[in-house]
Amino acid sequence: MDAILMSLMAALNEQLLINIYQRDTEDFYTGYVQALGKNSVLVATYNDAGLADGAVLISFVAISQVEFAGADLEDMTFRMRVAAAEHFKSLPAIKAPLHFDATRDLTLQLATQVQKSGQLILVMLADDDAYLEGQVTAVDTDRLTLSVFNKFNYTDVRVMQVDFSDVLVIEFQGLELHLETALQADRDQLKHLPTQIHQNDGQLQAVLAEAQAQAALVAVMPKGGADQFYVGRVLALNAELVVLRLKDMAGQFGGYVALRLTGLQTVTTQSDYLQTIAFYSRWVAAHDMEKQPVLNADREFDASGDLIASLIQSAAAFDRVVRVRGKESGDQLMGVPENVTATGFTMHADDTDEDVPFTFATVQELAFGHIYAYLQEARMRQ
């Protein structure tokens, strides 16, 4: 603990960009230390696109390591430079920033200020894997009362007493929480929709065709995706594959993905989470934040030909980064396709430093045109 505290003090005094790794999870935060309290640290955080994205209060007991240097921080520094140079869009400066006195309890100060502002926070507690989001409705000297808001299920209405001693992490003022604050302002008008999930029983083409005709959002879960799913609108469809124009978790344009229908587990056509993303999408569009200026969100696709082959060939010809998942493995590889032939190609695996062969027929997922592909391409051009 002494080593962690000394590292955080150095980061604060020298204003160093750091990674803070948490115990018992692969999650970590990247940013600059803003305040160092008796039991916790306040960090202004950055997201994977290199944009400032709110802040986090982390209890010392939740921290396993503080990192000052390495490939990840070097890459993040590059992303931050690109985001600034290319004028990536983010939330404007907060009109009423929060203020903290490092000599007083940081958690109590944060809880008091977010109660007054009404903004939502995300709380992670000890001995609980769940991430709780909601509004602080009351504050005592050693606890807060949280009115939980569940963006996945509008019928989940709870009020919880949270002891400060149980708090590991509190996130606040990021884009997603800003959007959720706007959404829950209409909480009384939100109508729960029963989730409609379609299993892959051979009828998904018809389900997706109807969604395409209605320009409706769907959530698509691949087989073996370890709970990973895509949200978007259907742009192209045939008997073998579907192309989605994706939405990220903030409702912003998230690139495209081509998916084999045989590789899909389910398609969800109605849910509260789809309502949430639809609201976010309307909000970011109304505030000119629907996409980053370097991305092309208006592509069209002809599904009558071998779309996987044409997309791979185009990516190889123009040095475009794609993310590929094959049939034999759930692992995804990201990079520029190489050694393209009439039937397949190779992708380079950085972890093994080997080229992995693919055939067009075995590609289950092909994602492209998103901000992380652009950033990797920018790094290649460096």
Image (spheres, rainbow, N blue to C red):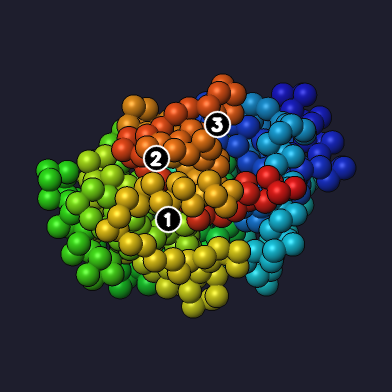
Q: Are marks 1 and 2 in contact (CB under 8 Å)?
A: no
Q: Residues within 10 Å of mark 1 (few under 14, many from 20)?
A: many
Residue 97: mark in rendering: none
Between tags 1 and 2, which lies in front? 2
Residue hosting label 1: 256
Return the residue at label 3: 348
Classify residue 206 by image quadrant: bottom left
Q: Amino acid at mark 3?
A: His
Question: Do the residues under discs 2 and 3 have CB atoms within 8 angstroms?
Answer: no
- Disc 2 is placed on an element classified as loop
Query: Height in image: 58 above or below 356?
Result: below
Instruction: Determine the residue positioned at 49% across, 78% down.
Output: 286
Which residue is located at x 55 percent, y 50 percent?
A: 317
Quickly name the residue at label 2: 342
How far is the residue under mark 2 from the one under mark 3? 19 Å
Q: Is residue 75 left or right of residue 290?
A: right
